[in-house]
Image (cartoon, grey):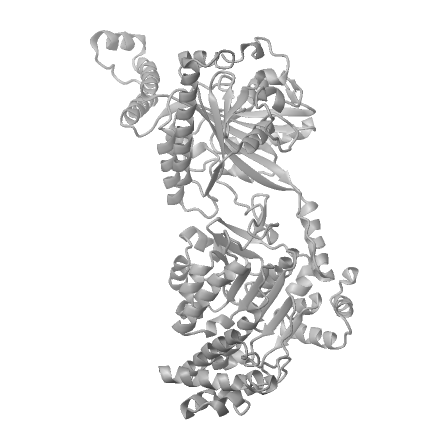
Amino acid sequence: MLFKKEVKRNPDRLSDVLPWAALVAQGVVLNKDGSFLSCFRFRGPDLDSATKSELISMSARLNNIIKRLGSGWSIYVEAHRSRKRDYPNSQFPDHLSFLIEQERRALFEDRSYFDSDYFLSLSFLPPREVARKLSGVFVEKETKEERSYTEVLENFETEIDRIFGLLNGVFPDIQKLSDEDLLTYLHATCSTKAHRVKPPECPMYLDAVLADDNFQTGFKPRLGNKIIQVVGVKGFPGTTLPALLDSLNRLSIEYRWVTRFLPMDSYEASKELEAYRRKWMAGRGGAKGFFSEALTGNSPVLTDPSIDSRVIDAETAMSDVKDGLVSFGYFTTNVVILSEDEARAEVEAKEVERVLNAQGFAAKIEDINAADAWLGTIPGNVRNNVRRPLMSSLNLAHLLPLSAVWVGPESDEHLGGPVLLHALTGGGSRFRFSPTYQDVQHSILLGPTGSGKSCALNFMDLQFLRYPNAQVYAFDKGGSARITTYGVGGSYYELGGGREDLSFQPLREIDDLDEMRWAQEWLIGIIQREGVDIVPSMKEAVWTALKALAETPAEQRTLFTLTVYLQSDELRQALNPYTINGQFGHILDSDKDTLTYGTWQVFEMEHIMQTPTIVPAVLEYLFHRLQKRFTGAPTRIRIDEAWLAFDNEQFATKIRSWLKELRKYNVGVCFATQEIADFEGSPLAATVREACQTKVFLPNVNALNEHSAAFYRGMGLNDREIQILAEAIPKQHYYYRSPLGSRLFDLGLGELALSYCGATSKEAQLEAYKLHKDSNSTEDFNMKYLKKVNIEWAA
């Protein structure tokens, strides 16, 4: 063995029973027995949204990877479940969003939520002679033994990289642990203290570096000031299925659930299985039958059907090993609970025991074997608590903690801060919601009327203010964002309906060449939508008129004046509805532009959407104006329903390019609609599906009918996810889906958040409009509004 002086026959401290010796390569530990160890962090599929066929396929693929590993390898898979009460600290720019954030903080800090982290450790012990020679590497000059060590290490790293590549195709997320991550994880397996561990300058004697607690053995072993309870498995059900032990992932208990598998080469496995077969064969006809078979080679007559079944099982297993379908090895699984409160630890251990027994296992809380069982859960300790019954690699794949309650990304790496919001989800966990996937923030939210769309959009807008210098721009329909806009002191503009707060002069700055080019494209788009077939001479005519108009004073650069310079009656007629003489002139043909800069602006579109012809022209102009504000600050654009008015392929192409361009400026667009049928028929549907990697689906009681189910499948949902939508509760549940994962969640809004985000009715808006009109400041409005809704404590 390596480091013989450090390996004691009678260990008297924790470091003596830890296996780790030194970091010898990036993410590789050399153990005291000459073995190498590397670890991965991974996440399996969420069982709630995975179909049976997906789980079976994953188990089969994992079996194909495990069976590659033979004698000398050891596999550790750990689910580390821990209590979470932390909540991100963010600075909000206004009183309302700050108070709502404090309401959220109380929700998540006053309760206990649980998350699980999953780790896979692989260790390889070279043949004994090689391991013996490696012991001289650290005390002798360079020799062929050192070259042997280098060769073994390189082979180990190559195999680890190969396995990592294979596992990448199995798990939604997997990363190899760096030196710091590896030491932090190993430290967590043997310590009661949770903190990061940086590699020491001399990365040796890791056992001493990582051991920072006292370890007491006995019937009730202790680690530091905590009692150790270990629940072990002594017997197994007759059959296994994928994710059989997923119920452990949903316990509101802190634990380490560790499964160890010591695989065998096919020859060794066949030898062990043959021994089992002979053992059961001996039971067929008693001692007489056994000796008869040994002497004559003839099998005895069957006497016990149950024994016969075991013999057939052994023969089938031998055949499977011979055909390369599975491998076999020794399986050990334990759940470790640490607690300062001994009574509580016993209660939690009994709950784990109950869950295991309910799945057909024979579970037992360890007593005399507790210390050895705990040591056997530490990666690299292959000699502690070895259970002898053989298990196939396929059964192992069924019993590993591979399924996971996916709780969302830990942070928004693109925005360099926390996720957008925290929400509630099942399994005693909380869900971290982020619309960002890689560098794309675009998302879509869709579902039937009355399912909670507007409330969710308002809340997401408010939570977006957690990012420094955030900007929120919303194209609303139905006034659903009115009250939140009043509450944060934003600007609320109603377009059309006889109560205009805005007047636009799109051609005011055409003395700038870039503005003139944009204006020409914008005007050509309007003319095309009026049914005119554009020819090159028309584009030239528009350009000539714009150049002439640019020579006039800024206040005279109106659409009406442009028509005076146009030489074509057909073009003048096409633009006439948008001039002061037409039905849309009061919006687009002003001699001044009153749209000013603001970090929160809402444009109410309901009235102008009643005349869809005007919508593309207005939105194109507003998008053009807003683009000047995109300087890299986090920006959220919410487009509610209005985007469906873009019912032509020309604009679909334009918006596809626009969405791609916005990514460069840290801008995310959230599309929303309750009109699923309109979405299906829109030329923009394919563009939005492609651009929005993050999709949020609202509950839909009709999701299972033929037409709706076909639509959801087209959006990428599987049959299980469609069923989730059909069973979800409207105005409470939302279903998140992105390449990162899927999860049903509940916003869990408090009374303050609901009083603003959920107040979307016409009656509530009218009351708020009157209060806002009679208020002299945002603070004054909030005080009056909160008194009106009986939440005066927040005022």
- Name the residue at 52% across, 45% down: 406
| Residue 45 percent across, percent down from the top left | 46, 43
Is residue 108 something that shows in the picture? yes
Judge by depth and name the residue closer to the eye, 574 or 448.
574
Picture layout, residue 133 above or below residue 595? above
| Residue 390 percent across, percent down from the top left | 40, 22
* Image-based side of 697 in relation to 351, left or right: left
* Image-based side of 301 in relation to 457, left or right: left
Q: On the rendered image, what quadrant is the C terminus found in?
A: bottom right
| Residue 568 percent across, percent down from the top left | 41, 91
Picture layout, residue 739 above or below residue 233? below
For this orientation, the residue located farthest to the front is 551
Judge by depth and name the residue closer to the eye, 194 or 218.
194
| Residue 170 percent across, percent down from the top left | 41, 40
- Name the residue at 67% across, 20% down: 214
- Name the residue at 66% across, 22% down: 213
Judge by depth and name the residue closer to the eye, 744 or 496.
496
Is residue 239 something that shows in the picture? no
